[in-house]
Image (cartoon, rainbow, N blue to C red):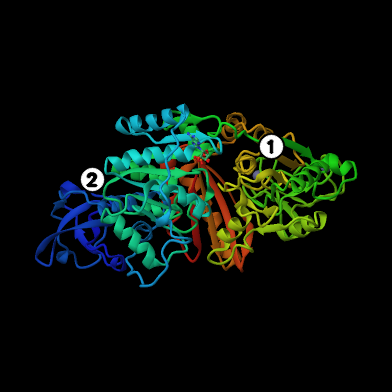
Amino acid sequence: MPLYADIIVNISASDLDRSFQYRIPEELREIIRPGSRVDIPFNRRQISGFVVGLSELPAIDEEKILPITGLSKKSVPVEDRMMALAAWMRDRYGCTMNQALMTVLPVKKAAKRGKTKVEGPALQDVAPAAAPPLNAAQAAAAQAIHTEMRGQNRPSLLFGVTGSGKTEVYMAVIEEMLKEKKQVILLIPEIALTYQNLKRFYARFGARIGVINSRQSAGEKSETVDRAKKGQIDLVIGPRSALFTPMPRLGLIIIDEEHEESYRSELSPRYHSVEVAEKLSALSGAGLVLGSATPSLESFYKAKNGRYQLLELRGRAVPESRLPAVYVVDLRQEMKEGNKSIFSRLLREKIEERLARQEQIMLFLNRRGYAGFVSCRSCGKALKCPHCDVGLTYHRNGFLKCHYCGFQIPFPDKCPACGSPYIAAFGTGTQKVESIVQKAFPQAKVLRMDADTTKGKEGHSRILSAFSHQAADILVGTQMIVKGHDFPRVSLVGILAADLSLYSSDYRAAEQTFELLTQASGRAGRGTLAGEVVIQTYSPEHYAVVTAAAQDYEAFYAEELPRRELLHYPPAGGMLSVTVSGADEAENETFAKELAERIRAEYTASGADVIGPTAHFRSKVQDIYRQQLFVKHPDKAILQKIQEMTRETGGVRIQTDIF
Ligand code: ADP
Ligand code: ZN
Ligand code: ZN
């Protein structure tokens, strides 16, 4: 039972480290937790402070520790809500309270004079546009969101194909909120924070918008935060960090493209925005709307189980805009018939057609999950772990390994399925593809968009804007080009090899593939031109490819969920992943082994399934060795306890994620 509480009394971010210890009176011992706001004696005055930690032992002479006066009864200002959120994040993500506070409470910085404001031409000057009247499905969705907010206030999942008019629904709901004098946070993946997308919001809501993005200086961000806190901004648009904008009149949070990986932070606390938004919604009473054409399996699972309200938009909003026609090409067949180029005959034909008609083309190279997975060029089979249903990855020692369970086999000299010797680790770079495209279609102007060409402040928008002004016929790129961009002249999307993400060593490989193929397909025929998509693949029969080609999310879900259930993968069960890293290989391995043993000893009886440790699939990065172990358990609260247990470290670094 904790007897003492560490309390901070001042939330200016630089001072967060300074906490004071107080005694917890008997009657409050069951009640006080990190995040509680309490009254305390301080310099002979009564002030209020926040509990950031609990301990059983005094840090100084016991006699000198003063008692907490009581729980604070003052009104709950926005900071309190953020403190409570930080306390929750600390437990959920296994970080320190300080790390949580640093994430949740924006650092105050004076804005430098003469600094640029929001990127691009002055958004403030965008002319107001009349909003199109909602169609029946959109109006019903907007209505259902309102009704839910006044009732149970469950999160709403707005599930609608690309171009179905989700953004118009958001805007209608935002408008209602603003009428009620409420504030709104809208999260958009950073990559979709383009002038084109922001313009729609400025045209509708004028100047009371604040935009946050990662290219802004701390001063610029601070200014937006400050204006939001003072109530001078009604709508904040930004990537995941915008969730922590302190809005005193917060009425609604919207997360567009909720399935996006970029909503997960890769720094500690490794939070997921959807989860944090749910908590913030509960703490503040604000509504929560999640939108996607390809919801994460987690979110759809919750919607199916009634934890979320499920709302659907089935067709495209503009009647003359149709979903594209999708063709699947079997690359094994192409090879058999002597075509070894990266273009199938069908794709080449369609590209030439488009070039002749001066329509635009996007060529998508799937690089996700590329971590040395190995497949057969003749039969297309990837080598998979017999125990875990994920791809085996190539290690430099000449072995193929499963990074979930450690299963390994020597690199085979022929395909175990068909006997072909054409078996290799997979992959072609974007640069190479660009030059192949240029050679194959010398008359075409080609642009490339990948991590290399988008470096620098305006990298993305420069390329996107050049393409939208038709400065090029073909845009070649990685996942970046599939995200929410709207190019009305694009009538053909080619997916060069759907397979790269299919056998990555991640239990979400099929989901990620389905999502990428569907989102990429959604780029074709956004305007009035009819769209076509060519998916090239070695696995035309794989359910992720088949259902993506049919653009049928529910069919995909129906195939995928039972597989997750069978192996107790999320969302059918909880999973904790623990990565242990350190400079000393042996020490690191020993630590990981002992940790796994301790978890087994304590939690096997309560049903935890501990897998590993095994070398991480990138087992050594910059001379740091990595071991990984997984714990499966249906109850996330138990996984949180186990996560807590991994926190006491000795010389190694530990990173945890609960899925
Ligand atoms: P999503 O966010 O689902 O991709 P958008 O809201 O961007 O879809 O809508 C796609 C296109 O359809 C946009 O050009 C938008 O202006 C148009 N649109 C949306 N709703 C309507 C409507 N009710 N009437 C006419 N056009 C609409
Ligand atoms: Zn084979
Ligand atoms: Zn395995």
Q: How many marks?
A: 2
Identify which residue, 619 or 592, lies in the foreground: 619
Given the image, on which type of amino acid does mark 2 rest? Glu
Q: Where on the picture, by quarter, is residue 618? A: bottom right
Between label 1 and label 2, give the one nearer the viewer: 1
Position of residue 432 measured from the top left corner of the image (x, y, whole percent)? 76, 59
What mark, if any, has residue 30 been given in the picture?
Answer: 2
Position of residue 84 measured from the top left corner of the image (x, y, whole percent)? 29, 50
Say if 242 sits above or below 139 in the image. below
What mark, if any, has residue 545 been given in the picture?
Answer: 1
Outermost residue toward the right? Answer: 338
Outermost residue toward the bottom? Answer: 113
Separation of marks 1 and 2 at Cα, in angstroms: 53 Å
Q: Residues within 10 Å of mark 1 (few under 14, many from 20)?
A: many
In the image: residue 235, left or right of residue 46: right
Say if 630 sits above or below 9 in the image. above
Identify which residue, 33 or 602, lies in the foreground: 33
Identify which residue, 293 or 505, lies in the foreground: 293
Say if 173 sits above or below 227 in the image. above
Mark before the other along the chain sequence, 1 or 2: 2
Given the image, on which type of amino acid does mark 1 rest? Val
Q: Where on the picture, by quarter, is residue 143? A: top left
Position of residue 282 measured from the top left corner of the image (x, y, whole percent)? 32, 41
Residue at 65%, 48% in the rendered image: 505
Q: Is residue 472 visible?
A: yes
Q: Secondary structure at mark 2?
A: loop
Position of residue 577 measured from the top left corner of the image (x, y, whole percent)? 52, 49
Residue at 61%, 43% in the rendered image: 512
Q: Secondary structure at mark 1?
A: helix
